[in-house]
Amino acid sequence: MTLALIDTSTANIASVRYALNRLGVEPVLAATPGEAASATKLILPGVGAAGPAMRALERSGWADALRSDTRPLLGVCLGMQLLFGESDEDSGAGVPVSLLGLIPGRVERLAPSDAGPWPHMGWNTLSFQPGSDPLLTGIEEGAHVYFVHGFYVPEGASTLATTTYGTRISAMVRHGHIAGCQFHPERSGAVGARILSNFIKG
Amino acid sequence: MLARRIIPCLDVRDGKVVKGVRFKDHEIVGDIVELARLYAEQGADELVFYDISASPEGREVEPLWVGRVAQVIDIPFCVAGGIRSVAAARARLHAGADKISINTPALENPNLINALAEEFGSQCVVVGMDSRKIGGIYRLHQYTGDPDRTLTSERDTLSWIKEVIERGAGEIVLNCMDQDGVRQGYDIEQLIAAREVCSVPLIASGGAGAMDHFEAVFKKANVDGALAASVFHRSVISIPDLKIYLAQSGIEVRP
């Protein structure tokens, strides 16, 4: 198994790479689709804003490549949000950002109201149907994982696991060969390491 | 349910973790990477590294040790100390830090907050504040790593909290200076005042000495996290014991 880490200049490449290293995997850093030619699985990491991240993916050719790719793909945090159709995160332009469109759905601004401050930052619990996906093997219902985000994907057809912060948030998603984590598995202790390991081995 | 965070703070000077009392008289407590690993294993929810000598000497944090920390720990960490530019922040984030925190540079150049938030997103922009009550008003201090250069700012703390949030800060760490290093409890009064104006996550800092101090700051000031240094470095409180105590007190924590 060769794993490629899609390298956009806005991403949290290093921490995801180190988490994979701790699992004994040395990923290929792929700034372009050509650099991932030998990979059998892909991870799309991401922190920051949707607009700049999409521009980086379009410049590098990754946006088009991912739309026709059939390899298992895991999006992490912003990388998960980018898999959807459109984001309300406008970067000041006042119009929605068009995303990769690999999974139907839209990214909305989180409005926690009484639940607490914005953004949603910290360790929150996972709710899911045990046995519903290989990515969740060995994970206990109610396990804590680390979230940092101000935008979210509402619960929908692709939702695998949720967390609650004012509203129910898609914490993990699955759509065919494409999956995603809204939280940061690379920063979620043993629980996150297990999810990454499940992706590598699955 | 979102858990309250327990955050050991590692003050870094010349590549070693140090601890002072009321910001003075620093002594070495250990190696950065070893302590980071130890706290992550014990159940710390996040770590903060402050290079306390950075602002006074005009230096910036060494990304080298940031990368060494990122390789070994699997919980989030924040790096602070003399980050004065988007490029300096980028170097630390790309080395593996999850957040960067600015304090004195934000006071000198508030536009830096906007620039960092636009470039990296608010979620990784933390503004740290050193604050104490002077003449009945909470005021900010600068260059607190060096007692000979520490200055009282003209700015008042509560209006600064509002301003930095408008500029894009995603988290506030409020260090209450009168309480720092003396282990008499967090400055609940100041933190309640800060909470009222703070719509982003608020982290209490300064004064932790016993487990009930953590309980009090979560229950009374409703902060999102509590930061402490000496009680953890000197094993006055163990993090696993603290988590059990807080859970039994009805506070949501990550086991």
Image (cartoon, coloured by chain):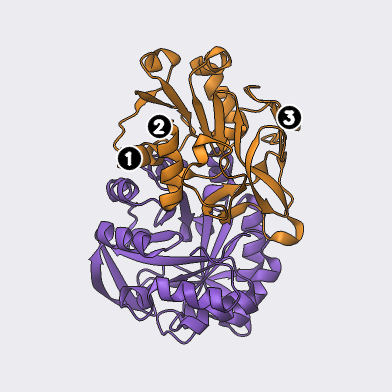
Chain colours: A orange, B purple
Q: Residue at x 72, y 30 (%)?
A: A105
Amino acid under label 1? Leu
Q: Residue at x 70, y 34 (%)?
A: A90
Viewer-side residue, A46 vs A128 = A128
Q: Position of residue A138 (x, y in %)?
A: 46, 46
- The label nearer to you, 3 versus 1, is 1
Residue B52 seen in the figure:
no
The reply to whether callout 1 and callout 2 are in contact (CB within 8 Å) is: yes
Left or right of residue A20: residue A149: right
Q: Please tell me whether residue A188 is drawn above or below residue B178 in the rendered image.
A: above
Residue under label 2: A200
Residue A86 placement: quadrant? top right
Amino acid under label 3? Pro
Q: Please tell me whether residue B179 is drawn above or below residue B63 in the rendered image.
A: below
Residue under label 1: A23
The reply to whether callout 3 and callout 1 are in contact (CB within 8 Å) is: no
- Pick whichever of labels 1 and 2 is earlier in the sequence: 1
Neighbor class of circle 2 (other Cα within 10 Å; few <14, some 14-19, many 20+) is: many
Viewer-side residue, B48 vs B34 = B34
Q: Position of residue B158 (x, y in %)?
A: 65, 69
